[in-house]
């Protein structure tokens, strides 16, 4: 396992990667971190600063200057902007005399060159000579290279005395079969469930330890996934890592003590890891292909239209969810004017990519599974928040026309079948009995009908009404609402919670449908009591809906209701 970790560390970049996991490692060792990287600020050579005792020694101040990969001649003192030697000079000449907090000035100081790889042979003498010449009575040097970091992670986070039995082997198995993403994801999911169950009704210190373990395991999976150039497993794993972390941490978020703040920081670290994985996945796998007609569909590499359909709607939900995270960040987090402008530009870009994904891949006009209403709802929510109602209307118009033709011609209409082999055969019979068995209930048509009413899409609303009258009189059209049991299970995939509103009649006027849906939203207060909503991180709930295939609550659309 140590070799696995060392190889992962060598692959990390300096900024937002190696410096993202080091503070957790130092905290796990018992140090107090008082300095972290700040975007755009001069750090005077110090990336991370901590104070405390390691292995029972005296309290010392540890000042880390972090570099990526191996230490070479160029990264030691070459032409690169972030060479190590100038950073070490800055620590001695500027940071220690001018920036070190007064309460730590009398403590011994350890300057720690930190990098994920090794010191290459040509630079060993230069590096060692510099450290010997700049050491003083109260200043010493300690090299934290990949081997040392891997040992600390292995012993401090992943050692069998600290992690539940079998989790180390599960991590190894997840890494070994990255080319089989579904199997790799299953192993990692099982690992997360063991870690989560190990801290049920546990102390805050144990919760904090498990959150740090989750982040480290996710980073290791991410590092190996990048090397294998297969990000599917780590994308799925990053989603449920964040959801499990939220489930574990949410009971402690409103407490006012040191551990609560550390727990919040650990959850934020996992959130940042999820963001990085998600952005990496979309920018490398999806975005480059959305502007070419049929490129994403061809990229599925399957001759089966079922495979293409399932993957394209899955991608639709992933792109929409990233857009919603950006929208959330723009709305609730105070940022500089420059970063706000970047966020707005990114939201606009994701919106354009989402529309191009739909228009250039016609299979997204022909949903196959009824639960694909979840991905459609995420896309509608993001596009509506981006003021792209005309694009939603155009999409719905074509989608409903094709569904109607499928019903009439006994083609592949939306169904409730879950088994893959059944979907391959669908529709396997042209009988009323088969139709009724495959469409006994639906969230697809209730969702599209409600959206058409809400956004005043008259023709599309009429199409839903006609489909219901002609083909789905037997079908229970439903919407889902969380209940008082939802908080316990919604972030970990428990499906046995929530309430169902059924029997929508789209021959009624639009105002009747809108009023009924939002009246129920007002009556069911459990939505507001969900921790993701209470703490203002609403995309967590949407991510849970996408990951665990739960319908999107209509509460999210209340802001679009015309006064």
Image (tube, helix red, strand yellow):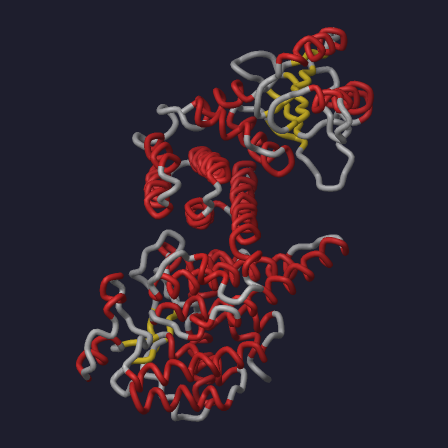
Q: Compare residues 389 and 310 and report the one nearer the observer.
A: 310
Q: Compare residues 155 and 249 and report the one nearer the observer.
A: 155
State the residue at coordinates (34%, 71%). 370
The percent position of residue 291, horizontal first and vertical second, equals 58, 64
Quadrant that contains the C terminus: bottom right
The percent position of residue 275, horizontal first and vertical second, equals 55, 49
The percent position of residue 519, horizontal first and vertical second, equals 45, 80
Q: Is residue 10 above or below residue 560?
A: above
State the residue at coordinates (32%, 44%). 183
281 sits to left or right of 248: right
406 sits to left or right of 106: left
Quadrant that contains the N terminus: top left
Residue 200 in sight: no
Q: Is residue 6 above or below residue 476?
A: above
State the residue at coordinates (62%, 29%). 68
Q: Compare residues 6 and 519 and report the one nearer the observer.
A: 6
Q: Quadrant of residue 340?
A: bottom right
66 sits to left or right of 9: right
Q: Quadrant of residue 417?
A: bottom left
The percent position of residue 67, horizontal first and vertical second, equals 65, 27
Q: Compare residues 290 and 294 and report the one nearer the observer.
A: 294
* Count of picture labels: 0
Residue 174 in sight: yes
């Amino acid at each position: 396992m140590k070799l696995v970790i060392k190889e992962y560390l060598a692959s990390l970049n300096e900024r937002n990667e190696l410096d993202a996991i080091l503070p957790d490692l130092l905290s796990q060792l018992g140090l107090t971190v008082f300095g972290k990287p700040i975007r755009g600020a001069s750090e005077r050579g110090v990336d991370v600063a901590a104070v405390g005792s390691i292995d029972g020694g005296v309290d010392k101040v540890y000042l880390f200057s972090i570099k990526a990969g191996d230490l070479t001649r160029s990264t030691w003192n070459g032409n690169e902007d972030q060479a190590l030697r100038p950073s070490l000079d800055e620590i001695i000449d500027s940071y220690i005399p001018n920036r070190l907090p007064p309460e730590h000035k009398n403590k011994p100081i350890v300057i720690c060159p930190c990098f994920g790889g090794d010191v290459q042979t040509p630079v060993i003498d230069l590096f060692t000579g510099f450290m010997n010449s700049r050491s003083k009575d109260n200043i010493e040097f300690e090299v934290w290279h990949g081997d040392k970091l891997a040992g600390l992670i292995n012993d401090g986070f992943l050692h069998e005395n600290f992690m539940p039995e079998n989790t180390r082997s599960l991590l190894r198995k997840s890494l070994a079969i990255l080319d089989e993403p579904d199997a790799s994801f299953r192993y990692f999911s099982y690992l997360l469930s063991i870690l989560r169950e190990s801290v049920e009704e546990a102390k805050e210190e144990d919760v904090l330890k498990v959150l740090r373990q989750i982040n480290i395991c996710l980073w290791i999976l991410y590092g190996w996934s990048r090397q294998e150039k297969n990000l599917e497993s780590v994308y799925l794993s990053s989603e449920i890592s964040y959801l499990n972390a939220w489930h574990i941490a949410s009971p402690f978020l409103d407490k006012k003590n040191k551990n609560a703040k550390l727990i919040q920081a650990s959850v934020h670290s996992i959130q940042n890891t999820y963001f990085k994985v998600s952005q990496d996945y979309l920018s490398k796998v999806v975005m480059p292909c959305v502007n070419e007609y049929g490129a994403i569909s061809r990229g599925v590499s399957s001759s089966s239209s079922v495979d293409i359909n399932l993957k394209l709607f899955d991608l639709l939900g992933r792109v929409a969810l990233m857009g919603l995270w950006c929208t959330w960040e723009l709305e609730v987090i105070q940022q500089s004017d420059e970063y706000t402008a970047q966020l707005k530009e990114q939201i606009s870009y994701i919106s354009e990519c989402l529309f191009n994904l739909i228009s250039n891949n016609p299979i997204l006009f022909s949903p196959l599974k009824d639960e694909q209403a979840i991905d459609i709802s995420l896309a509608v929510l993001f596009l509506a928040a981006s003021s792209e109602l005309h694009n939603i209307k155009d999409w719905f118009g074509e989608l409903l026309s094709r569904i109607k033709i499928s019903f009439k011609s006994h083609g592949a209409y939306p169904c409730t079948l879950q088994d893959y082999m059944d979907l391959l055969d669908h529709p396997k019979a042209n009988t009323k009995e088969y139709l009724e068995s495959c469409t006994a209930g639906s969230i697809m048509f209730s969702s599209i009908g409600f959206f058409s009413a809400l956004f005043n899409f008259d023709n599309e609303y009429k199409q839903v009404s006609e489909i219901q009258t002609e083909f789905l009189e037997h079908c229970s059209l439903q919407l889902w609402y969380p209940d008082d049991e939802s908080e316990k299970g919604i972030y970990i995939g428990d499906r046995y919670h929530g309430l169902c509103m059924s029997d929508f009649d789209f021959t009624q006027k639009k105002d009747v449908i809108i009023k009924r849906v939002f009246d129920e939203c007002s009556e069911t207060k459990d939505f507001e009591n969900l921790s993701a909503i209470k703490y203002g991180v609403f995309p967590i709930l949407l991510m849970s809906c996408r990951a665990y295939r739960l319908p999107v609550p209509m509460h999210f659309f209340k802001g679009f209701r015309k006064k």
